[in-house]
Amino acid sequence: MIVATVFFYLFSAVMIASAVMVIASRNPVHSVLFLILAFFNAAGLFILMGAEFLALILVVVYVGAVAVLFLFVVMMLDVDFVQLREGFLNYLPVGALIGFILVVELLLVLGGWVISPDAVANIAVPIPADPSVSNIQAIGEVLYTRYVFFFQMAGLILLVAMIGAIVLTLRHKPNVKRQSIVDQVGRTPEMSVEVRKVESGKGI
Amino acid sequence: MTPNLLSIAPEILLAVGAMVALMFGAFREDESSVSITAGLSIALVIAAGVLVWLVPTDPEPIFGGSFLLDPFAKLMKTLIAVGSAVAILLSVDYMRYGQFTRFEYPVLIVLATAGMFVMVSATDLISLYMGLELQSLAAYVVAAIQRDSVRSTEAGMKYFVLGALASGLLLYGASLIYGFSGTVTYAGIADAVSGSGASVGLTFGLVFLLSGIAFKISAVPFHMWTPDVYEGAPTPVTAFFASAPKVAAMGMLIRVVIDAFPTITTDWQQVIVFISIASMGLGAFAAIGQRNIKRLMAYSSIANMGFALVGLAAGSEAGVRGVIIYMAIYLAMTLGTFAFILAMRRGDTMVETIDDLAGLSRTNGPAAFFLAILFFSLAGIPPLAGFFAKFYVFLAAIEAELYALAVIGVLTSVVGAFYYLRVVKIMYFDEPVAPFERMGGELKAVLGVAGLLVLLYFVYPAPLVEAAGAAAKSLF
């Protein structure tokens, strides 16, 4: 129990610190790297709560895809972050007010949760239904049986999205030199080397 | 427990066939790949439409209550298959002029058709949403498929942003309905509302759900995208938008209100009555000032959706039968009209204004005749099919004692007759301008067949009326 508590505080502290660093660090690449650290610690918190599926999804989707995409955007677009930061103090009061309202709302919601223990009793089905199997197993057991139709439909929708992205953005430029591995492998000495008899004292 | 996969065999055929066509188009690099994938796609869609009738109907929804192939779904799927196949056929001529050389277009139509098949078979909110998204996503892409044209990309962008908003509304409604009924299946929702009636939250969710679907059938007040998208999208794409997706969304709407909310008819009836009156009114009056024939057809389709909803507002079996007949006849009229619009070409450019039709009767008599038939039918003049379509829905509304709705419907259809007849007048009585290029063979065929169907419907209406009656019966 004590180990779990220690890890909870460790993950939480690192997560909050890295979240602060995301907005505080001057270098945008560092910001994204701190964001990834925050995601990893959030995943750790999920595992402590027994939600290992969410933890894996968080790492796979957010770290594996979203954060890497951010990194690409930051590195490829020439955004002047110093300029963006100008006037930070002007916006501070409004930002602080919004943050304060958000905190109050969160506290009210969470306060309501703590005050009313009946809320827990309203959960219709314990998840997972059988406490002896893990989350991932419970999801897997229904995903490919009960919900196989939806799963396949979702796959088709993603296929359409992929076709759409290719149709609307892919352009074949005729003048670009591309690597053709077939041509490279298929080359023979006869095609690439020419032996000429050169008379001494004369060029070709 | 193995689900009965036979019922979704048409959808599986479409999905697998689309992937095969996609691979074919991607790996065959010469010019012929476009026409071959188009031919393959037409064959696939027709095969799926036929296959629907070869597999047995389900007594119960399969996949845990998510998917049902009943006579209603079969008939709607046939109409959808016809709409999609003809829409691909209509694009062939456009491709011939080299304005449209993307093999992905027919493939996306096939995938959209699979989505539409799921929409009309959906018996829970998740498969409803999945089918809708599959159809919509493919539609957003084909709207923008001429990516070098500013109008086409603008149409795609508008359609995408507003469509995403509508999907959001629909999802919000669906989540409220789920939250207040505890289930996503239509049967479960019907059980939940049958005892104590709908709670406020559920009614709230229902309104949002109907708003989302109203966007998809371009009913007022969610119609704003329609004229811009119809005008901006390439004309074969507009022909597609006006035909099969409308039928599918209407089928989905009928099933969700009849199956999931049978005991609270009055709750959704008022919403349907409102959007029906608003659509008929706006469609009739806003079309008067239009000079562009694609925009005119956009307002015409808004008005037509309003008329079809009159039948649904009745909430009765006769009303649903009327809507199905209406959609079938609407499909024929729309596809025929767009076959003609696609032939409005001078030299290498498409012309789109109504004034370009001046004196068509003297430059191309047969085309003018068939177009006049279609426009008379859209105006609802007997004995053409469009008259009977309106007759069935108004009759159902009167039987359900919705007199005001029926009277407003008749009045707006008189206003609508004005702009349809004006086009006919321009074709027959104005001085001819330069003739159009020769019509492509398949355009002629579609225009001719649609014109004859509309003209001769009154001779032998029994097959459609009986099929629609059987389909409507299976819902109640």
Image (cartoon, coloured by chain):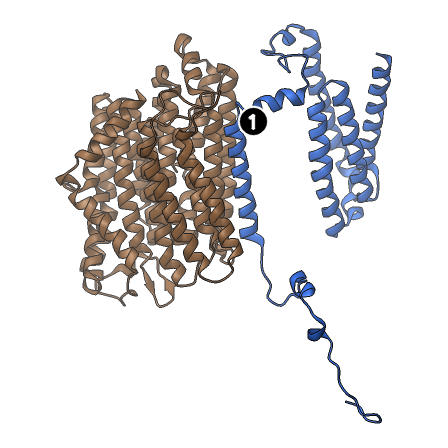
Chain colours: A blue, B brown
The amino acid pointed to by label 1 is Tyr
* Quadrant of the rendering where the C terminus of chain B is positioned: top left
- Residue lying at the far bottom of the rendered structure: A201
Residue B64: image x %, image y %? 47, 20
Does residue B467 sit above or below B341 in this rendering? above
At 26% across and 45% down in the image, what residue appears?
Answer: B333
Does residue A87 sit above or below B401 in this rendering? below
Does residue B286 sit above or below B313 in this rendering? below
Residue A140, picture quadrant = top right
**For this rendering, which residue is in front, B461 or B228?**
B461
Residue B160: image x %, image y %? 51, 43
**For this rendering, which residue is in front, B36 or A203?**
A203
At 77% across and 19% down in the image, what residue appears?
Answer: A48
Chain under disc 1: A
Q: Is residue B22 visible?
A: yes
User: In the figure, is residue B272 to the left or right of A91?
Assistant: left
At 27% across and 51% down in the image, what residue appears?
Answer: B446
**For this rendering, which residue is in front, B442 or A25?**
B442
Q: Is residue B405 visible?
A: no
At 39% across and 34% down in the image, what residue appears?
Answer: B249
